[in-house]
Image (tube, rainbow, N blue to C red):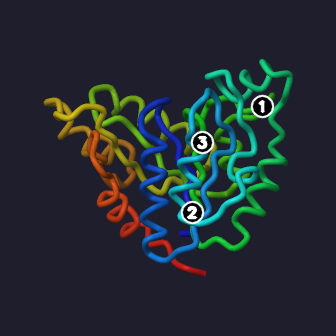
Amino acid sequence: MTGLFVTATDTGVGKTWVACALARAAARRGLRVAAMKPCETGDGDDGARLIEAAGRALDPQLARPYQFHLPASPEVAARAEGSVVDVARIEAAFARLTRDADFTIVEGAGGLLVPVAPGVLMADLARRLALPLLIVARAALGTVNHTLLTIEAARARQLPIAGIVLCRAVDTAGPEEPTNPEAIAAWGHVPILGLFPHGRDGDAVADRVLDQIQPRAR
């Protein structure tokens, strides 16, 4: 396992939190980590957080090749600024960024079917970067349907899935939460790699995720 493309069932489910925790966990193991947010929309700091989590100097122009102010899909946000996302530019940045890396974390924007550029969805970008998917899903009610739809979309495009992690949006688990991982695993035929707690350090969970996917230094 040389890296992961972190996607999600929706926006705001915890992709950046999970991606940063995994980057920190890999760096603690002595791996040279490359972290990338190809397209950042809105005035957030996801790319900067990923760079910090990697624990080594990364070129921000490579780690975050596109940044747009409008909180929308990359295609729409780019158009609002009179621009178009060039996927070849992202691929070139990825190649340079990962040249000396042992383990790479790429965080997508939103879910797999978010438009990146005319004729290009986030799923197409994941395919071109050739990393297996880590799907981040909510822990609460509704996650079974959303996660199974994401799994189905990935498999329809023959994208490999490393596994699922769940994120809890509130402190207390609802009555439905304990059965959700089992249902997703049974119906989706995918491993559930961990549950990230709400408002607490996720590094211990990230360590358990890495134990399962077993990244190795080159």
Q: CA distance from mark 1 to mark 2?
A: 24 Å
Residue drawn at the location 53% of the way across and 51% of the way down: 133
Q: Which mark is residue 177?
A: none
Residue at numbered disc 1:
117
Left or right: where does residue 177 sit relative to residue 127?
left
Tag 1 and tag 2, C-beta contact below 8 Å:
no
Q: Position of residue 118 (x, y in %)?
A: 81, 28
In the rendered view, does 32 fall on the left or right side of 185?
right
Q: Nearer the viewer, residue 3 or 170?
A: 170
Mark 2 → mark 3, Cα distance in angstroms: 13 Å
Q: Tell which circle, 2 or 3, labels the residue nearer the N-terminal end.
A: 2
Q: Quadrant of residue 39?
A: top right
Q: Disc 3 and disc 1: Cα gap in Å?
A: 14 Å
Quarter location, residue 199: top left
Instruction: Classify mark 1: residues with Cα within 10 Å, few (<14), some (14-19) or many (20+).
Output: many
Mark 3 lies on a secondary structure that is loop
Which residue is depicted at the point 55% across and 34% down? 111
What percent of the width, then of the height, locates residue 173?
Answer: 17, 35
